[in-house]
Amino acid sequence: MRNNSPAIILALVAVLALCLMTAGCTSSSSDTDTPQATGTTVPAAASTTASGATAGSVTAVPYTALIPFLPNAPAGWTAEEPVGASWTVEDGQWTWASRDYSKDDAWATIIIQDSAHYDVGYWESWDSFVSFETTEGYYKQRTVSGHPSWEYYSKPDSYGTWIGVNERFMVYVSVEGGAKQDLDAFVNAVNYGGIANLK
């Protein structure tokens, strides 16, 4: 799985947060890492979601249950084989599945994670995102299939979207070297209703 995109995104967020704080605004960014290996213990603080669910109150679905929700490649794109992993956290676990796609010099990634309501993976950064727009790009709050999301763009051709599903699942879509239409094609190809119904 390619890791360049999340690192670039987080670096951009950190730089922009620093600029905002220097200008007198108070916002912060926390780093998040894409998982690299199965079985690693990840510390997480006990938390309660807005809906009242507590960390570990559900069992994460196996990553094999997430893989079928990684869509086939849109026209003109080629899909690589999906990968997945389970991670130990406190007394439970969280899982993720990912698939890379390519077209000429462009590539895209879709990651689906089941946090089991732990503050892990992309959920660690969710509350630190802030809306902004500059000459170099933007972060904007959106809604995708009725679910809250954040979309970013960074010049010249870096796009991404995080979609939070039931305060438990996170879908991350990134496109490098493509266009906004490519991002939209991948975002719209995901079955969010099916993910929301996973138990």
Image: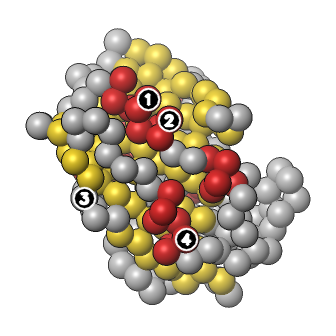
Alpha-carbon neighbours of circle 3 within 10 Å: few (<14), some, or many (≥20)?
some
Q: Is residue 68 left or right of residue 83?
A: right
Q: Amino acid at mark 4?
A: Ala
Dot 3 or dot 1, earlier in sequence:
3
Dot 4 or dot 1, earlier in sequence:
4
Q: Label 3's element?
A: loop
Q: Label 1's element?
A: helix
Dot 4 or dot 3, earlier in sequence:
4
Residue depicted at x 30% and y 31%: 158
Query: Do the numbered discs 2 and 4 sit on residues whose CB atoms are within 8 Å?
Result: no
Q: Amino acid at mark 3?
A: Glu
Query: Do the numbered discs 3 and 2 sit on residues whose CB atoms are within 8 Å?
Result: no
Q: Is residue 137 above or below residue 17?
A: above
Q: Amino acid at mark 2?
A: Asn
Instruction: Point out the residue furthest to the front here.
Output: 75
Query: Do the numbered discs 1 and 2 sit on residues whose CB atoms are within 8 Å?
Result: yes
Give the alpha-carbon distance from disc 4 to disc 1, as whole Å. 24 Å
Colour scheme of this structure image?
secondary structure
Q: Is residue 176 above or below residue 64?
A: above
Give the alpha-carbon distance from disc 3 to disc 1, as whole Å. 19 Å
Query: Closer to the camera, 100 or 91?
Result: 100
> What is the number of the mark on residue 188?
2
- The residue labelled by disc 1 is 184
Q: Is residue 177 left or right of residue 59?
A: left
Residue 195 picture location, percent across and down: 63, 56
Instruction: Point out the residue furthest to the top here.
Output: 135
Residue 172 picture location, percent across and down: 47, 48
Alpha-carbon neighbours of circle 1 within 10 Å: few (<14), some, or many (≥20)?
some
Residue 17 picture location, percent across and down: 48, 34
- The residue labelled by disc 4 is 65
Give the alpha-carbon distance from disc 1 to disc 2, as whole Å. 6 Å
Q: Quadrant of the C terminus?
A: bottom right
